[in-house]
Image: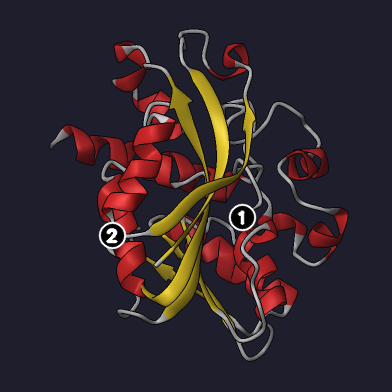
Amino acid sequence: MAKDDEIKAFVKERYGKIAVQGAAGDGCSPSCCGASADIMEKARARGYSMEDLKNIPESAFLGLGCGNPTAFAELKEGDVVVDLGSGAGVDVFLAARRVGDKGKAIGVDMTAEMIDKAKWNAAKGGFTNVEFKLGEIEHLPVEDGSVDVIISNCVINLSVDKLATFKEAYRALRPGGRILISDLVTEGELPEEVRRSFEAWSKCVAGALDKREYLDTIRRAGFREVGIVRESSYDKAELDERLKAKITSVQVRAVK
């Protein structure tokens, strides 16, 4: 099996376990899960307001992510939204609240356990304008030009083919549609031992691109008006003691 397939299998197994066991604990790096044991504090640290948290099932928040993409996505009533790597559904549910009954929020995740968890949360929360689909973000199970907005939260760094992921997002969007992506990027080179580590891949570190390369990859996929709307730095010592590069959480907006 190719290394890319091994990485994907490792990531899928790890997040499947998180879906079954509940909120990520000590095994997840602060980049994806945070160091705080209090789940609400984790959420607030990532840009979720208390009002946001009141509007979704608490079990939807597993302590994953590095931002709140819905906060900057400028969603409006009637929009069709797709969340890449939707996990237990937290951002799908927030998007669903914003787009209303005339809109729709679709979550795509490659982990069957996460899809099952998200569907359970949707039923628990009484959401009728959401859908969760099993699939890979490099091969989205949606039709061409059928989506208004694509969001994602600390997931594209897990992809072994980021250009393919952004090309798929471009394909799925209607003309004038946009992406709002929260993700981790580097400023400087990661040590080779980190790049080769399956554990570092699954913790959102090893797969992170250099910030300029990340933005350029989005442009190469066809997007325009590519820009960072918000960014913040992580303490390297908290992420991985082997790191030399600066790790930054960015929220990127671009338009088809």
Which residue type carries mark 1? Pro
Task: Identify which residue is drawn at 64% across, 45% down.
Answer: 67
Near-viewer residue (1 or 246): 246
Instruction: From the image, tell me which residue sits under label 1.
Output: 69
- How would you rate the neighbour count of disc 2 (Cα within 10 Å): few for under 14, some for 14-19, many for 20 or more? some
Near-viewer residue (238 or 118): 238
- How would you rate the neighbour count of disc 1 (Cα within 10 Å): few for under 14, some for 14-19, many for 20 or more? many
Task: Identify which residue is drawn at 47% across, 32% down.
Answer: 185
Residue 94 position within the rendered picture, expressed as x and y whole percent measured from the top left: 69, 66
**How far is the residue under mark 1 from the one under mark 2?**
19 Å
Query: Which residue sits furthest bottom?
Result: 102
Which residue type carries mark 2? Lys
Relative to 156, is 152 above or below?
below
Relative to 12, is 188 above or below?
above
Residue 72 position within the rendered picture, expressed as x and y whole percent measured from the top left: 65, 58
Near-viewer residue (180 or 65): 180
